[in-house]
Image (tube, rainbow, N blue to C red):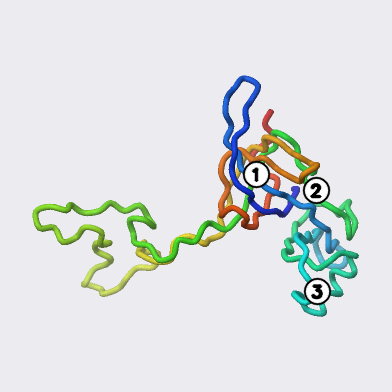
Amino acid sequence: MTLILGRKRGMTQLFNEDGTVVPVTVVEAGPCVVTQVKNTEKDGYDAIQLGFEDVPDRRVSKPQRGHFKAADTAPKRYLREQRLAAPAEIERGGLVKADAFAVGQLVDVIGTSKGRGFAGTIKRHGFSRGPESHGCMNVRQPGSIGTKRTGKLFPGKRMSGHFGDARITTKNLKLVRVDADRNLLFIKGSVPGANGSFVQVQTAKTGSVKA
């Protein structure tokens, strides 16, 4: 599996040779620094740790400064680990860039959805509203939430509450274009999060490369 960290920059559209329009999301991916390499002998499993986006030294603790210094890189805002099925071929301090992906490849994109604050059941869960005529007093109320025989509310009941601001994974999106010079990935369709938000792009766990 290949992993890279980046930021969502927005949506645009590309044209195929036959003139069809492809809606794409532009992700500024990397370059990411390999801040740590783990192996089975020392850590019990094989993995690499990636760092993305520089931050000032004052933003990190002393142990973290030593961690980044060992990789010969500036402190990073985001750190993510990727487990490997075999020992890593890249060394500590190496770079992972957008060209690690290929056009036509399927990817999974992980991001944080837009936060919409407190929302009712209609907006949050797509409930239907009640009639607004003939004296009906239940227009946007959630309706019955239980029974007075037991007086209990069963766990998992869909009700009003905090909407959005959750970790979302969009799977099997096709990679339409790779701009290695500008570290840009053009991914078909939409990905979670607002423009400028942090996202993770990784090789799809299910699916295969599309032509």
What residue is drawn where x is 13% and y is 58%? 136
Q: Tag 2: residue type? A: Lys
Residue 38 visible at all: no
Q: Nearer the viewer, residue 19 or 170?
A: 19
Q: Residues within 10 Å of mark 1 (few under 14, many from 20)?
A: many
- Residue type at mark 1 is Val
Q: Residue furthest top?
A: 18
Q: Earlier in the sequence, mark 2 or mark 3?
A: 3
Q: Nearer the viewer, mark 2 or mark 1?
A: 1
Circle 3 residue: 57
Question: Few, some or many C-alpha atoms within 10 Å of disc 3 (few <14, some 14-19, many ≥20)?
Answer: few
166 vs 133: above or below: below
Badge 2 density bin: few <14, some 14–19, many ≥20, Cα 10 Å: some
Task: State the residue at coordinates (69%, 33%).
Answer: 104
For the point 77% across and 44% down, which residue is it? 182
Mark 3 to mark 1 CA distance (whole Å): 30 Å
Residue occupied by mark 2? 97
Image position, residue 123 (x, y; %): 36, 56
Look at the image and tell me whether residue 111 can be seen.
yes
Which label's residue is closer to the chain start, 2 or 1? 1
From the viewer's perspective, is residue 74 above or below residue 114? below
Query: Circle 1 sits on which residue?
Result: 26
Q: Is residue 172 left or right of residue 48?
A: left
